Amino acid sequence: MAMQSPFFNKREPDAYNRQTSPNAAAAAGAPTSAATPAVTTVAANSVPVKEGESKLTVGPNIKLKGVEITDCDTLVVEGSVEATMDSRVIQISERGSFKGSAEIDIAEIRGEFDGNLTVRQKLVIYSTGKVTGRVRYGKLVVEEGGQLSGEIDFGTSAPARAANGTRPGLQVHTTAA
């Protein structure tokens, strides 16, 4: 008789129910008390994921390396990713890191990004965020404490050369101390 792997069985319906509010617990038939905390996790100022859109979350302590990520509307990085991707939204958490190349509509960086980043619409670097490498953006918001270094260009198309051979945009060069 063959045994089925427990990893691919359906979840019990009540085993993973999360309580989001005392009203939800009451609706589910669970007892409520004043000591029952309400659990809500909504990231302020983050881009909402619409129902039916694809979302990939690389959780804490997870390392995803050497891949090409396609057809992903939102990538949430809480662990470590080394990849190439073309997506709509990337959200890198405080402990998350992305190394590689990405073409994104909206990027929210709270952790680290290293590589080639093209943001077609809006790049937001929060106070804990650090972006290094070659960066192109449509709009840029950097909170106090956020770090941005490397070759930085406004606009998402290839930068044009000026008459004197230099390129427009911000170029940051650092020297070792």
Image (tube, rainbow, N blue to C red):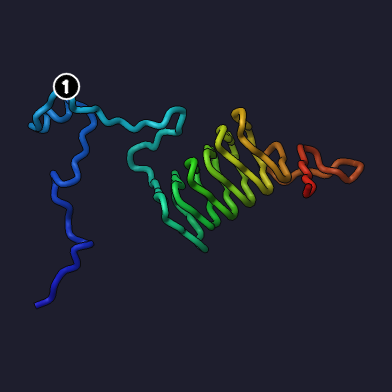
Please provide percent x and percent y for residue 92.
Answer: 49, 43
User: Which residue is at a point 65% across and 46% down the rendered structure image?
Assistant: 132
- How many labels were placed on the picture? 1
Please provide percent x and percent y for residue 71.
Answer: 45, 52
User: Which residue is at a point 40% across and 48% down the rendered structure image?
Assistant: 57
Which residue is nearer to you in this view: 174 or 163? 174
Instruction: Give amino acid for label 1.
Output: Ala
Please provide percent x and percent y for residue 105.
Answer: 54, 40
Badge 1 marks a residue whose secondary structure is: loop
- Residue 143 seen in render: yes
What crowding class fits label 1: few (fewer than 14 Cα within 10 Å), some (14-19), or many (20 or more)?
few
- Residue situated furthest top in the rendering: 34
- Residue situated furthest front in the rendering: 177
Which residue is nearer to you in this view: 166 or 9? 9
Horizontally, is 177 left or right of 27 in the view? Answer: right
Which residue is nearer to you in this view: 60 or 69? 60
